[in-house]
Amino acid sequence: MSSPSPARPARRPDGGTHAEPPARRTGPGAPTSAPGEPPLDAGERNRLLGLGRGAALPTGPLPPVHRTVAALAAAEPGRPAVVCGDDAVDRGGLQAWAGRIAARLAAAGVRPGDRVGVLADRSTAMVAAVLGALRAGAAYVPVDPSHPDERIAALLADAGVTATLVTGRHGDRPVPVPVAADAPGLREPTGPDAPADDEPAADGSADDEAYLIYTSGSTGAPKGVVVGHAQLAASTAARRAVYPGEPVFLLLSPLAFDSSVAGLWGTLTAGGRLVVAGPDAYRDPEALVALVERHSVSHLLCVPSLYDALLAAAERTGPARLASLTTVVTAGETLPEALLRRHTAVLGPSAVLVNEYGPTECTVWASYRRCRPGGPVDIGGPVPGALLYVLDAAGRLVPPGVTGELHIGGAGVAHGYAGRPEATARVFVPDPFAGGTARMYRTGDLVRWSAEGTLEFLGRRDNQVKIRGHRVELGAVETALRGCPGVREAVVVPDPDGDRLAGFVVTDDPSGLPALRARLAATLPEAAVPAVLRAMDAFPVTVNGKADRAALTALLTPAAPAPASPSPAPADPAPAGPAPASEADTLARVADAWAEVLAVETVPADVNFFDLGGHSLLVIRLQDALESRTGVRLSVVDLFRGSTVRAQSELIRAGAAAGPATGTGPDLRAERARRERAARARRQRVQGGAR
């Protein structure tokens, strides 16, 4: 789970940004005071080490997660395990399915210690695939199906996978040795050639690899973070200690996003039920609200911006629909205090909101904070088994109130980066406070201990940013831009909202900017592709002669663009007036909504929303903007499928002709009362099961 970096570099009181500290010295004899401060005495040093020391994990070796899942299945095979849409599988069925997948992988040449790619849509088969890879003794390497073929091929080649588990249409994509995890003969044995379902899980040690997940690299090349079974088991045991019971967990994170590890293994090893948001549902907050209600979901984890959209959907359709939620975890972005207030207003004070922090290199999480209504929002203290140190540039502990770089030691520190020993050595360094062969990870994040003894997150010491929860190195994107034909120089900055990138280029051919963006989209993950590209004759510079990033960012906040047509948006999101009747009027209103959401002045009628810089969260904003202008509320799925102004105009005209949807009348008291009664019953069941 990537760290919740703010959208822009943290500002010093003098208006500058935090610079990268000089090379530091660490070791058992390194001093333990901040520059200019008197040396820390033994008592203060021990107090600081105590603040960063997480609760102890169970003693002795922890079993790998897939063995824990197998033991639970053997004890109660008929208990529900995973559900996605109308498809459900129990513990015994999931184990049998995973065993057949493991046997098929072995037949394809996979041996213990190998790596297996996973290219799967959100489904029960996706869960069976990763479990089957582990049962085969392999490490799983998830890749995002939304990525272009070129990027997927590059990642799988870099990982050196032996085979690739695929689902559905992805079997036709160019991947090494595809094995269909959703083949009928694997889920249910059919015919004499069906593989056995009683294959034992492959033996292996705690030092073996469990999974490899890619994160952005600073030179344009992604880095694969290798996590072993010992680290995964420790992180998962810590999660069960912090969140006891058998959760009903709504899995929203893509498999290639490391927070999926928390939901997947934290739920299955606790004997809980995993609810996988399907390919369409995960995009639509109103559909997610329906999933929570339908399955009595008790726990979920997502980035704050998605949770805000989920709460907004609940406010529209009935807050009682989320009454089963007892624990909501946010991570990957800075948690705004306003979201904490909204959470309390919608769900009430009994539903816990937890802010988690942790880089991929430390197995999903390293610290957490149970947020109190009206209390401070920070990243809290260490999870069980973690060691947190706030160090100055010389590697010395700093006292509370003094800014330093966060270093993380303990049970969750990953093996390193696959095939990149130099990159590994730069950030996985000896832990002088734990001694022996222990290592700690240099996060690059600036923090300080508060008077309360919790960590306050202050920003990054480099030019890494977070875009919708994804860690993106600006230097990587700039390197990719400079590699494009005709580009002489490039600077990339996050937009003022922090959810998109903007690129500024000095180029020989300004008219070729759309082609540049298309070229980037073929190789970079979606979050790293600039939503906006602007050509300039030269960049503004600072007094030191460097590109003035603040001045470039300021160019992204002009006055609101003039509307494409004189159709002001009413305050009520569901206007009483009829939808526009003429095709031209509808086109103009849709273009107006696009211009507002994308912050652009002109919108072609036949250009894809995502090619103009749109993304999944902007689709949700577009849904509201269209409704305010036309009186028709399109589903998020329709907006993804009809992703041009012209296509959406046709959908709106069809919706207007069909008339208002049923169930949207003003008198909803009886329905809300019914939902509240059902919600109380669900909450009682959830609370009863937790005891």
Image: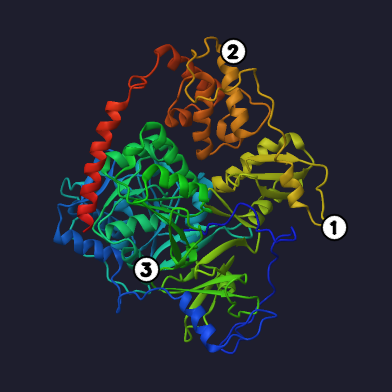
Residue 282 — which label? none
Density class for disc 1 (Cα within 10 Å; few <14, some 14-19, many ≥20) is few
* Residue 367 visible in the shown view: yes
* Residue 354 % position (x, y): 42, 56
Residue at the limit of the structure toward the top, as seen here: 582
Badge 3 or badge 2: first in the primary sequence? 3
Q: Is residue 45 left or right of residue 690?
A: right
Q: Which residue is mark 2?
A: 584
Q: Residue 542 location, x and y as percent? A: 82, 55
Whole-number angstrom distance, CA of label 3 to CA of label 2: 61 Å
Circle 3: element type: loop
Q: Secondary structure at mark 2?
A: helix
The answer to whether residue 365 is seen in the rendering is: no
Q: Amino acid at mark 2?
A: Ala
Residue located beneath label 3 in the image: 113
Nearest to viewer (mark 3 / mark 2) = 2
Q: Residue at x 30, y 27 (%)?
A: 669
Q: Is residue 267 left or right of residue 173?
A: left
Q: Is the residue 528 above or below the residue 230 in the image?
A: above
**Could you say which quadrant of the image residue 368 lies in?**
bottom left
Camera-side residue of 442 and 612 = 442
Amino acid marked by disc 3: Gly
Instruction: Return the disc, 2 or 1, that comes first in the chain's sequence.
Output: 1
User: Marks 1 and 3: which is nearer the front?
Assistant: 1
The residues tagged by marks 2 and 1 sit, at their Cα atoms, a distance apart of 51 Å
Q: Residue furthest front?
A: 374
Residue 417 vertical position relative to residue 347 in the rendered view, above or below: below
On residue 543, the disc is: 1
Q: Are marks 3 and 2 in contact (CB under 8 Å)?
A: no
In the rendered view, tell whether residue 540 sits above or below residue 517.
below
Element assignment for label 1? loop
Amino acid type at circle 1 is Val
